[in-house]
Amino acid sequence: MPEIVVSAEKRTETGKNVNRRLRVAGRIPGVVYGGKGEPMAVAVSPKEIGAVLRSASGENTLFVLDLGGSRRKVILKEYQVEPIKGRLLHADFYEVALDKLLEVKVHVEITGTPVGVKVQGGILDFVTRELEIECLPTDIPDKIALDVSGLELGKHIRVSDLQLPDKVTMLTDPEVVIVHVVAPRAEEVVAPVEGAEAAAPGTEPEVIKKGKTEGEADEKGDKKADKKEKK
């Protein structure tokens, strides 16, 4: 796979107004952490960072940050997205040493349809979608694939059941459940109360008083109903 290179410029000014002008100009602010020096404020293209996020390994992608000819191997540390339109607002980077172990989180991707769902009528509950691992930067897997086709009703798969790629160490507790197949919940049916529709004992139906027309009685009933609602 070809190496991903993202161009960056060092920033000397910071602050909300500066960042706003930067975004209007088609760049976003960011900070580079790690390495031997202090954190460095930079400006990058949101389109180039978006391309990194859309790559196979997503936010765990190892790429080059080119600062005017000074090239640094980095991964995304954090990024901020505008909640409504989804535009990138900020990106932080972590400079890595290729010979030092790194702790990262990797997504779990399940494949197949469990027999407990297909044959036994259960429901697949995907409990843990992300796992923490330790490895060298060049050994970070794109994802951890998990085939669930043999999973039966009432059974589960824990972290300890996974087969990890070489040179990758699992940091998540081995007892953590990743997926399990559960029985569907039965809908509770409430039986109607016997005689609920009948008049309560000891009560009599309202009688229209003699001398009142049905229209006048209806009007009177409406007024009673109005008062009841107001209360």
Image (tube, grey):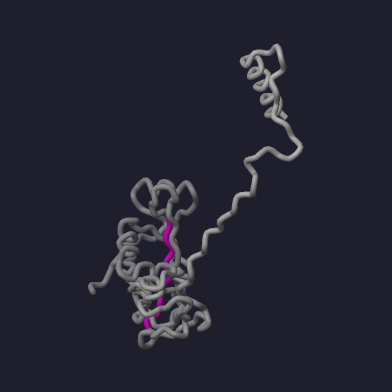
**In this rendering, would 61 be left or right of 226?**
left
Query: Quick one: quadrant of the C terminus?
Result: top right
For the point 51% across and 83% down, which residue is it? 174
**Range of residues picked out in magenta:** 90-98
Decide which of 58, 28 is in the foreground and name it: 58
For the point 72% across and 17% down, which residue is it? 209
Picture coordinates of residue 123 (x, y %)?
Answer: 44, 68
State the residue lying farthest toward the bottom: 166
Q: Is residue 52 above or below residue 18?
A: below
> Is residue 192 within the magenta segment?
no
Q: Is residue 211 above or below residue 53?
A: above
For the point 48% across and 71% down, which residue is it? 182
Q: Is residue 221 above or below residue 77?
A: above
Q: Which image quadrant for residue 46?
A: bottom left
**In this rendering, would 83 be left or right of 230?**
left
Decide which of 220, 56 is in the foreground and name it: 220
